[in-house]
Image (tube, helix red, strand yellow):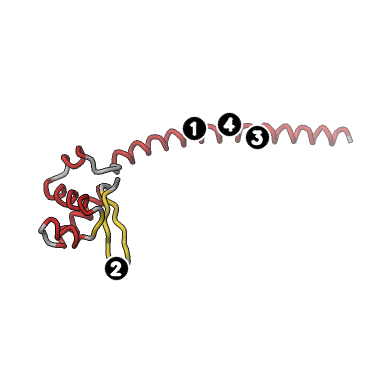
Amino acid sequence: MPEEVKRLVEALEAIADKLDRIYNKLIELATEQHKVTEKLKGAIEEVAPKALDVVALLKLPDHLRKTALALDKLGEGTADDVAKVTGRKRAIESAYLNQLARMGYVIKKRVGKKVVFTVRS
């Protein structure tokens, strides 16, 4: 019986050692994951601007700036709504609004059959 207890104790010690190594590896991985997450947060903030501020507007080409300002004036609207403000064709405004959405300056959402755009704030 004492021999059996000795083997059980050795087995438990081996398990405890393996668990310690697993725990240390998990801590190491969590630290690395945190570092990567922080790097990605910075990259995402650079790629997708939070708002269409004055500096962002000045960086835009004239044709996109006109569309962005028209949408900002409306608050939200379709390409047709923006076209009425800018005096350009709906298809042109649709292309410009989609470009602004890809750049991260406006939010695009579907409402029924219509696509509505809003300036990111």
**Disc 2, SS:** loop
Residue 63, how many percent across, how many down?
Answer: 12, 50
Separation of disc 4 and disc 2 at Cα? 54 Å
CA–CA distance in space, label 2 to label 1? 46 Å
Label 1 is placed on what type of residue?
A: Thr
* The furthest residue to the bottom: 113
Give the mark nearer the N terminus: 4 vs 2. Answer: 4
| Numbered mark located on residue 31 in the image | 1
Task: Say the numbered circle drawn on residue 18.
Answer: 3
Q: Give the percent coordinates (x, y) of residue 109.
A: 31, 58
Residue named by callout 4? 24
Q: Are marks 2 and 1 in contact (CB under 8 Å)?
A: no
The residue positioned farthest toward the right in the image shown: 1
Which of discs 2 and 1 lies nearer the camera? The answer is 2
Mark 1 neighbour density, 10 Å: few (under 14) some (14–19) many (20 or more) = few
- Callout in the foreground (2, 3): 2
In the rendered structure, are the residues bearing label 2 and label 3 in contact, judged by CB atoms less than 8 Å apart? Answer: no
Choose the circle earlier in sequence order: 1 or 4.
4
Of the residues under marks 2 and 1, which one precedes in the sequence? Answer: 1
Q: CA distance from mark 2 to mark 3?
A: 59 Å
Q: Which mark is residue 113?
A: 2
